[in-house]
Structures are given as C-alpha cells and as structure tokens.
Image (cartoon, rainbow, N blue to C red):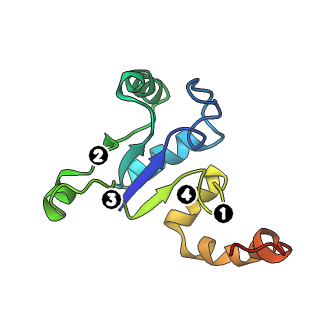
Amino acid sequence: MIIAVDFEGTLHDGRYPVIGNPLPYAVATMQKIKSRGHSIIITTCRPVRLQNVMIKWLNDNKIPFDCINDNLSHINVKFENPRKTYADVYIDNKNLLGLPAWNLVYDLLDNTPAILSLHRYLPVIVGNNKKSIH
C-alpha cells in the first residue's frame, strides 16, 4: 500500500515554519507502517529551501519515508508522470473529519474491525450539526 502523510500538523505539533515535537504515537506508527512493507510519501507545502530542515527532523526522529512530494517510480510510469501525488491512503490533519490519534491510525490501516468500530463516533462528528453547505 502507498500511504501519503502530510507533514505540518500531522506529524508534529509546530506551526509553520517552526517544526515542533512529534505528535503522540506518530513515530511508532510510522515505523510500524514501514515495517509492514508499505511505502510512505511525505507531502508538504514547504518550499524546497525549507525541506532540508524537515528531512533532518524526520531522520533525527527515525520517521521512515520513501520520497517527498513525489510519486514512486512505478506510479510515474503507469500514469505518465502525474502531477498529483498518488497514494492508496492519505493521512492529513486537514481531512474532512480531522486527524485521528496516531495509535488509531495504525489500527485503521491494519484492522478492518477498527474501521467498522468508527460508526460509534459518527453521531458525535455529524449528529448534532444543523448547518449544511449549500
């Protein structure tokens, strides 16, 4: 599986351009994801001039990754160098329902019953919201 993981606000608690501390369970979860043979793409809006600091932070925190803002080579061949980063799963704090706790992220990726158990959270997430987008 190819997993794209946002950097800012997803892997750390800092506010751009400052890189903060890893979010709880983020490092262990990323290591576990990689150990299961998944590919990891780090996605970021950081300009190239600030990416060296980010790469050092990832390496210092032992967060594995295969590439940054790029596709794996077989995806580039299949889709003739797509501009969008292709992944099977995108982990980002800007998701519609937000970022689950990192220990739940791994369970969701690795365990269908964990996904099915999310139904208990849906009333909390959407149940009392009377506003709609028109």
Q: CA distance from mark 1 to mark 4?
A: 17 Å
Compare marks 1 and 2 and give the one earlier in the sequence.
2
x, y percentage for residue 74? 17, 57
CA separation, marks 4 and 2?
A: 23 Å
Q: Are the residues flagged by discs 1 and 3 in contact, CB closer than 8 Å?
A: no
Query: Which mark is drawn over residue 39?
Result: none
Q: Quadrant of residue 18?
A: top right
* Residue 81 rendering spot, x and y as whole percentages: 18, 54
Q: Which residue is mark 2?
A: 70
Closer to the chain start, of discs 4 and 2, is 2
Question: Mark 1 — residue?
Answer: 97
Q: Which residue is mark 4?
A: 106
Of mark 1 and mark 4, the one earlier in the sequence is 1
Viewed as shown, does residue 75 lie left or right of 53? left
Q: Secondary structure at mark 3?
A: loop
* Crowdedness near tag 4: few (<14), some (14–19) or many (≥20) residues, C-alpha within 10 Å: some
Q: Of the two numbered discs 4 and 3 on the same chain, state the one appearing first in sequence.
A: 3
Please state which amino acid type lies under the numbered disc 1. Answer: Leu
In the foreground, 84 or 6:
84
Say left or right for 7 vs 69.
right
Q: Residues within 10 Å of mark 1 (few under 14, many from 20)?
A: few
Mark 1 vs mark 3, CA separation in Å = 21 Å
Q: How dense is the environment of label 3, judged by Cα within 10 Å: few (below 14), some, or many (20 and up)?
A: some
CB of mark 1 within 8 Å of CB of mark 2?
no
**Mark 4, mark 2: which one is toward the viewer?**
2
Q: CA distance from mark 1 to mark 2?
A: 25 Å
Q: Residues within 10 Å of mark 2 (few under 14, many from 20)?
A: some
Mark 4 vs mark 3: in front: 3
Give the residue type at disc 4.
Tyr
Q: Which residue is mark 3?
A: 86
* Residue at left offset 59%, top offset 58%: 95
